[in-house]
Amino acid sequence: MDPHAPHTEPVPRVGVVVVGHDDAAHVTAAVRSALAQGPVVGEVVAVDDCSTDDSAELLTRLAASEPRVRVVRRRVDSGGCGSPRNTGLDRVTSPYVMFLDSGDLLPPGAADALLRAATDAGAEVAGGLCVRREVTAGEVQKEGHSARAPRGHEGREVPWEAGLYAMRAVYESPAQRPRLVHDTLCVNKLYRTDFLRDHGIRFPEGRFRYGDFVFSARVLAAGPRIALVPNRVYVRHVRGCADRMPSAPDRAGIADWRARTEASRAAYEILLAAGRKELAREARAKFLEHELRMYACELESHDVHHRRAWWTLTRAYLAEYDATDWEHRPTAPGCLVGRVVLASPEPRDLPRIRALASRPARLLPPYAHTPDGTPAWSADLPRITLEPLLTRPVRLLPLTVDAELRPRARTALLRLRLHELYGRVAQAGPEALEVEWRCRATGRAVGPRTTVGLGAPTGGGGSAGVFWSAEVTLRWAAFAFRRMPAGGARVWDLRLRVRFRGGAYREVTAQTRAGAELPRRCAVVGARHAVVLMEPYSTHSGALALRVVPGPRGVMSVVRDVLRRLLHCHSRPQAH
């Protein structure tokens, strides 16, 4: 595109299909975000999937004042998002089409950026960056008709597959960038309508979870030319309320995991049947690195029946992998987790699996060797060798740092230990730890990073092995005086960077130290003499974090905790 060419208004060439079910609180905001794309969007097909709330009425009222909106109401609830998307696709008359879920938004300029990328490159598909934004139930009504974050929540947005969209790129075929398989979303892309229709590319009908997996595989199997842009083109909302959202299914039940494996299998078979062997292999690698790691992180929190069912189902699916699949990325954490699951008929080593599946990955001690000295997963699973770790770059090693927090009146002592990993840590020469507490909601740090030196290694015996130690003083006031959300809490994650000789470094999180109890909640007088509750806790992946609750909620939490302990003491039977 010539940067000196005169700017011309885009012609209306894009149709946006908006689907929703019982989502009256958000569906009109989604449609308005599509209309706000400007004249490039010539039509918005709003498909109501047999809602029982006011969704259809609100859409009809909006269509009466906006000629670009057409409302299609399905008479039978499909139970998913595939059927209404297909319904909308059948109604679209524009040469290009996009998809939008009722609870989400298109940021300004998204359709124009994707259309220009597609037309400039002559591409059948154009994709951009999708970001995930958490929105609490109380903020739903504040969103209005804009794709901007609610006031006070302009902080961190988590990008999806950011590496794919770091810069503009055009691929003649998906085979040029196998990583495209990892982006299974359909909503952050624009498609040439006749390309989808000519190849019969549609979503699975009915109650098919993760239909995006199948749809995306069908798109890639057809071998389109693909253009990518670094623009934010989709804002996916995850709300703290019980909305029925296709983009945020419940992962608690085993049925959800079964649906994930079935959709992943279907995507693999579609790519393989089309002769896209490299993409099919990448689809299996994606399952290990995304699906398996995400669910394995949460496995320990489920009951024994769920664990066994999950383990059996996963082993059956992984048994379909061949040697080439396992050799594709042998040191990847998901691959190692998968090999452990496949090697054991019963759930085992769940704390280690959880740590290895977390991001960044951690391989917890103790570390075992085979009789010939080869690194292995454990003494009773020596056939799962970890020899590739001996040559893996230090910046990618699954290093473990554990933490112990000892509170005082106004401060706390944070003790950190960096564990040796088959001699690789000593070989790299650890010099220092950079310590930072980062707000989960905004991504902002409490203050500048604290750097502490690492001395000579200690240990050598027992389960702890060899480790390097450091201590950091944590001042409660640094958190108590931070601006807090009204009536809400802030969560601060501990982030570490291990610095090695020669400038190499590794970003890690801190595992709560095995056998060490986290301190109880403690109240701190913060800004303007307000009480702030500080609560250290272990995340679902085992990392140390700090929850800070301000004002009356903090006071009530302290009171309830004291009363609970008193009642427990009085109800305890007296010794004779």
Image: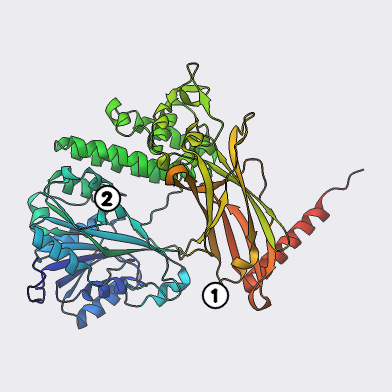
Is 210 located above or below residue 335 in the figure?
below
Residue positioned most to the bottom = 65
Cα separation, mark 2 vs mark 1, equals 37 Å
User: What colouring does the structure picture have?
Assistant: rainbow
**Which kind of residue does numbered mark 2 sit on?**
Thr
| Residue behind mark 1 | 486
Question: Picture coordinates of residue 203 (x, y %)?
Answer: 21, 52
Q: Nearer the viewer, residue 113 or 85?
A: 113
The reply to whether dot 2 and dot 1 touch (C-beta < 8 Å) is: no
Q: Nearer the viewer, residue 86 or 130?
A: 130
Q: Residue at x 45, y 63 (%)?
A: 443
Element under label 1?
A: loop
Placement of the N terminus among the 4 image quadrants? bottom left
Q: Residue at x 71, y 61 (%)?
A: 561
Is 284 located above or below residue 510 in the figure?
above
Question: Picture coordinates of residue 186 (x, y %)?
Answer: 24, 55
Element under label 2?
A: loop
Is 521 located above or below residue 387 in the figure?
below
**Residue count near mark 2 (Cα–Cα under 10 Å), binned few <14, some 14–19, many ≥20:** some
Q: Residue 244 vs residue 490: left or right?
A: left
Question: Picture coordinates of residue 35 (x, y %)?
Answer: 21, 75
Q: Residue 279 vs residue 23: left or right?
A: left
Is there any visible trace of residue 20 in the rendered image? no
**Which kind of residue does numbered mark 1 sit on?**
Ala
Give the numbered dot on residue 184: 2
Residue positioned most to the right = 576
The first of marks 2 and 1 along the sequence is: 2
Q: Quarter of the image holding residue 167?
A: bottom left
Count the labels in the image. Answer: 2
Q: Residue at x 77, y 54 (%)?
A: 568
